């Protein structure tokens, strides 16, 4: 090892020769020594045996630049991104430097683009490659959420609010916001799911919720039980349907009952109830509408059946013939063969044509002025033969006009012990009124094969045209047992309290 000032002293030949040899030795050994040469020159080499490095003097000859270890290891200055330790002659701010201990950096144009450290590689800028293989976890760091490929789980893991987006404008999004999961079509177009068979199951994959089959049905489930299924003709529902809003059906709808059906017929714009299918109203089915196969029935089981309308019409089934017309604050009209016969007025009723009661016609234009009715209230027994007795069935009327007529109805009820023939007649005061049989009486056979049987004689009528008074007038019924009936003995016939007399005053 040798150093030299590289100046040959003037001396004798041997000394000069020795000095030259020392210079050569210094050159050959790169001025090796434990201390720097006493005389230094720009670009001078020094093998610093104390530091074990090879150095070169800088151009200003005021410092040493370390080049490499004496054992062959290349060492450089740390450098910076603007002046890297390894640069390029024509691009000195591009190269390699060390930003700190255990860090290797690559700078381009004075900007650090890659940093290698004990934790790995950090790249600033865009990475473009023709293919890459990552054999460990890979983290994609977002502004607020990360995406990780977890090698041990074999899955790409999106943190909450980290999205997988598809489409140039991010039209399709898939993400979890920390509470719910979303598949969102947020751009243009339609979200389409393409599959020959499509299923939606619960998270445990143990329960069906939705199924859809190509060329087949779509099924909806509740608690893993199918409730709705499309069919080739429409849909099938298992269980009831509850709608909280308006529902629209665009085709026929059939309501299948246990025995009969109800159909909404779209083409007919009608609900069609089969025979004996009922429309019911009220909590206890109080009102029913139905057709029993023969007749149409409106059945009211509770309260009063009330029809409310300012105008009420009943026509024939063809709708071309009036039966009954009624108008609020106006008339009620009754028709016969589409011809009005009775009309109510503010003063009573108007009749077009004759009034006939049990076959007897009232005079044309007559008006019903008043009605008096009496029901016999006490039963009595009788066995008179050959003479009439008063039954106690009476009714009194005071005519409003002396020219009026009185129409008398009587419905008589008897209870004979055996077969009995009973005669009866109607009187005005003491005047016997003919009832169609000479002698002033009518006879009826009341059949009763055992005691306690009842018989009723059909209502008889008397049209009294001879009152000529406005005074109170009393009508009564008398009866006798036919003397020709040999079976009558003692008190064998009862006159019953359910007998009725009705008087009607008709204008003359």
Image (cartoon, helix red, strand yellow):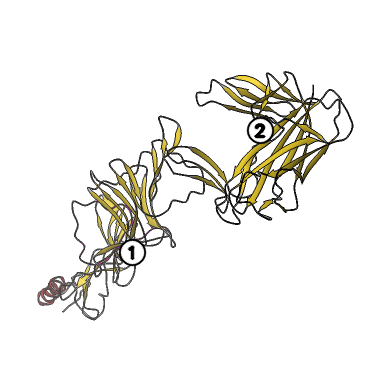
Frontmost residue, 203 versus 32: 203
Q: Give the labeled residue for mark 1.
A: 203
State left or right for residue 212 relative to residue 246. Answer: left
Q: Is residue 505 above or below residue 290?
A: above
Q: Does the magenta portion include 6? A: no
Residue 362 shown left or right of residue 486 in the figure: right
Q: Nearer the viewer, residue 476 or 395?
A: 476
Disc 1 secondary structure class = loop
Question: In this rendering, does residue 292 appear at all?
Answer: yes
Q: Nearer the viewer, residue 170 or 428?
A: 428
Dot 2 falls on a residue whose secondary structure is: loop
Q: Where residue 25 sits in the image (x, y, percent)?
A: 13, 74
Which quarter of the rendering shows the C terminus?
A: top right
Q: Are marks 2 and 1 in contact (CB under 8 Å)?
A: no
The location of residue 368, given as percent across then percent down, is: 76, 28
**In terms of image quadrants, where is residue 373?**
top right
Q: Looking at the image, is mark 2 or mark 1 nearer the viewer? A: 2
From the image, give the main secondary structure of the stretch colored magenta: loop
How many residues crowd around disc 2 within 10 Å: few (fewer than 14), some, or many (20 or more)?
few
Label drawn at residue 411: none
N-term mark: 2 or 1: 1
Q: From this view, report whether residue 472 is shown above or below residue 200.
A: above
Whole-number angstrom distance, CA of label 2 to CA of label 1: 60 Å
Residue 163 in sight: no
Residue 111 drawn at (x, y percent): 35, 55
Q: Which residue is outermost to the right? A: 471
Residue corresponding to mark 2: 309
Residue found 35% across the figure and 40% down from its top: 190
Q: Range of the magenta residues?
A: 121-143
């Amino acid at each position: 090892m040798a150093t030299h000032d590289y100046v040959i002293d003037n001396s004798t030949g041997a000394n000069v020769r020795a000095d030259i040899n020392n210079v050569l030795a210094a050159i050959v050994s790169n001025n090796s020594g434990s201390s720097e040469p006493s005389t230094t020159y720009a670009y001078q080499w020094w093998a610093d045996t104390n530091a074990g490095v090879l150095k070169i003097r800088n151009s200003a000859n005021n410092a040493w630049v370390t080049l490499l270890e004496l054992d062959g290891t290349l060492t450089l200055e740390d450098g910076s991104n603007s002046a890297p330790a390894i640069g390029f002659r024509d691009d000195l701010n591009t190269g390699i430097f060390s930003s700190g201990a255990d860090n290797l950096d690559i700078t381009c144009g004075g900007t650090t683009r890659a940093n290698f450290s004990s934790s790995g590689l950090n790249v600033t800028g865009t990475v473009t490659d023709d293919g890459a293989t990552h054999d460990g976890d890979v983290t994609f760091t977002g502004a607020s959420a990360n995406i990780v490929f977890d090698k041990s789980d074999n899955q790409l893991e999106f943190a909450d609010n980290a999205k997988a987006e598809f489409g140039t404008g991010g039209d399709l999004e898939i993400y979890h916001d920390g509470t719910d999961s979303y598949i969102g079509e947020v751009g243009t177009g339609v979200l389409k799911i393409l599959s020959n068979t499509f299923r939606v199951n619960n998270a445990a994959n143990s329960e069906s919720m939705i199924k859809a089959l190509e060329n087949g049905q779509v099924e909806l489930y509740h608690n893993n039980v199918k409730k709705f299924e499309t069919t080739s003709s429409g849909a099938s529902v298992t269980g009831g349907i509850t709608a909280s809003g308006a529902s629209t059906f665009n085709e026929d709808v059939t309501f299948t009952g246990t025995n009969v059906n109800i159909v909404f017929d779209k083409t007919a714009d009608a609900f069609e109830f089969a025979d004996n299918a009922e429309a019911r109203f009220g909590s206890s089915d109080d009102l029913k509408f139905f057709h029993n196969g023969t007749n149409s029935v409106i059945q009211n089981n509770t309260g009063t059946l009330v029809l409310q309308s300012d105008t009420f019409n009943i026509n024939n089934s063809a709708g071309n013939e009036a039966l009954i017309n009624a108008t609020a604050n106006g008339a009620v009209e009754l028709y016969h063969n589409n011809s009005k016969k009775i009309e109510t007025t503010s003063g009573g009723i108007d009749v077009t044509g004759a009034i006939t009661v049990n076959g007897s016609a009232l005079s044309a234009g007559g008006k019903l002025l008043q009605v008096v009715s009496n029901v016999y209230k006490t039963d009595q027994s009788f066995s008179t033969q050959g003479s009439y007795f008063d039954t106690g069935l009476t009714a009194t009327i005071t005519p409003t006009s002396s020219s009026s007529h009185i129409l008398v109805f009587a419905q008589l009820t008897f209870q004979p012990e055996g077969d009995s023939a009973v005669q009866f007649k109607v009187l005005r005061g003491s005047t016997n009124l003919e009832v169609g049989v000479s002698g002033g009486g009518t006879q009826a056979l009341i059949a009763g094969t055992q005691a306690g049987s009842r018989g009723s004689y059909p209502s008889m009528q008397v049209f009294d045209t001879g009152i000529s008074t406005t005074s109170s007038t009393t009508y009564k019924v008398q009866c006798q047992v036919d003397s020709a009936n040999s079976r009558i003995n003692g008190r064998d016939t009862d006159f019953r309290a359910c007998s009725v007399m009705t008087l009607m005053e008709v204008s003359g």
